[in-house]
Amino acid sequence: MHLSGRFLPWVAAIAAITLVAGLFWGFFLTPDDYRQGSTVKIIYLHVPTALMAINGWFMMLVASLIWLIRRHHVSALVAKAAAPVGMTMTLIALATGAIWGEPMWGTWWAWDPRLTSFLILFLFYLGYQALWHAIDDPDTAADLTSVLCIVGSVFALLSRYAVLFWNQGLHQGASLSLDSQQHVDNVFWVPLVICMCGFGLAFLALVLVRTRTEIRSRRLQALLLRERMA
Amino acid sequence: MPDLGKYADAVLAAYGISLCLLAAVIALSWIQSTRMRRRLEEVEGRSSE
């Protein structure tokens, strides 16, 4: 708690600066794409949030595995704390994708492999949180949600790689690549990378805040229980 | 404000919805954190008396 308390203001400040700078640059200072027009500006929201939605679930997976193997209580709380933030990222990615899809693909939604697996990932985020709230015993809740997280990882993985497995989908391949022949032009790429850093740091700051709240909640429950026993 | 052309509605809707959702999760996390810290301080104060 002491260490996270020291880091949190810095992480939050850097996240805010990076996010505002990236979105400002992307929205105000980049040109329109010759095919997509101004809808290309949605990339600065859609790509970083989709990335964090998937990476957030993998972070929950790692924390859940640590809980199942080592029974480290904080790791279970980290997974619990990350879920609402990851769900918000998933929802933003779904909403911005649909808004971009309507003028570009001519439809808000298609049962495309990547889109469908992403929708299932969103439902897993919802179910994960519902399961935490449905079970009174925190250790049992952590056990069951960890198993759910492992199962959901299949869809997180599918969301990431579905475009490589199936060719019939509408969704295009990766916008970013280490191969300079493939990735988007630098005029879009630089603000996009800044936005990705901003969303990543914002995710980290929010998970830190929420984990600290969960730890305090556990301590509060313990103190109230002790009061009742006395 | 940049000229967004015929896609202005779509771009502004995407930014509006995203920023609202982001603000909501930040506000909710902050409110829950403040409330929990206050409650814990209150109970810790009561326990130490």
Image: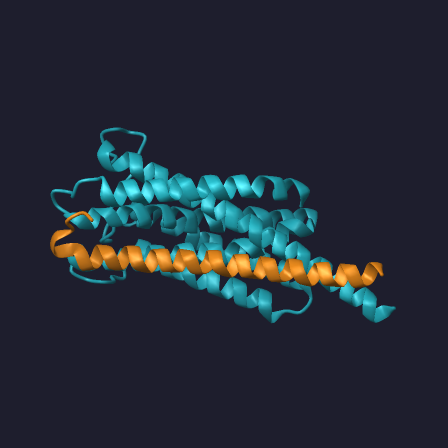
Number of callouts? 0
Q: Which chain does orange denote in the image?
A: B
Q: Quadrant of residue A182?
A: top left
| Residue at image coords 37%, 51% | A159
Residue A173 in view of the camera = no
Looking at the image, residue A82 sits to the left or right of residue B12; the answer is: right
Query: Percent from the top left, x then y, of residue A144?
Result: 61, 62
Q: Quadrant of residue A216?
A: bottom right
- The colour scheme used to paint the residues is by chain
Looking at the image, residue A113 sits to the left or right of residue B37; the answer is: left
| Residue at image coords 42%, 57% | B23
Query: Percent from the top left, x then y, of residue A165?
Result: 32, 47
Residue B9 in view of the camera = yes
Q: Which chain does cyan denote in the image?
A: A
Between A110 and A29, the one nearer to me in the picture: A29
Between A124 and A205, the one nearer to me in the picture: A205
Q: Quadrant of residue B19?
A: bottom left
| Residue at image coords 48%, 42% | A13
Q: Is residue A134 above or below residue B47?
A: below
Q: Is residue B23 above or below residue A62?
A: below
Query: Percent from the top left, x then y, of residue A202?
Result: 46, 46
Q: Quick one: quadrant of the C terminus of chain A?
A: bottom right
Looking at the image, residue A99 sits to the left or right of residue B39; the answer is: left
Between B18 and A181, the one nearer to me in the picture: B18
| Residue at image coords 59%, 48% | A63
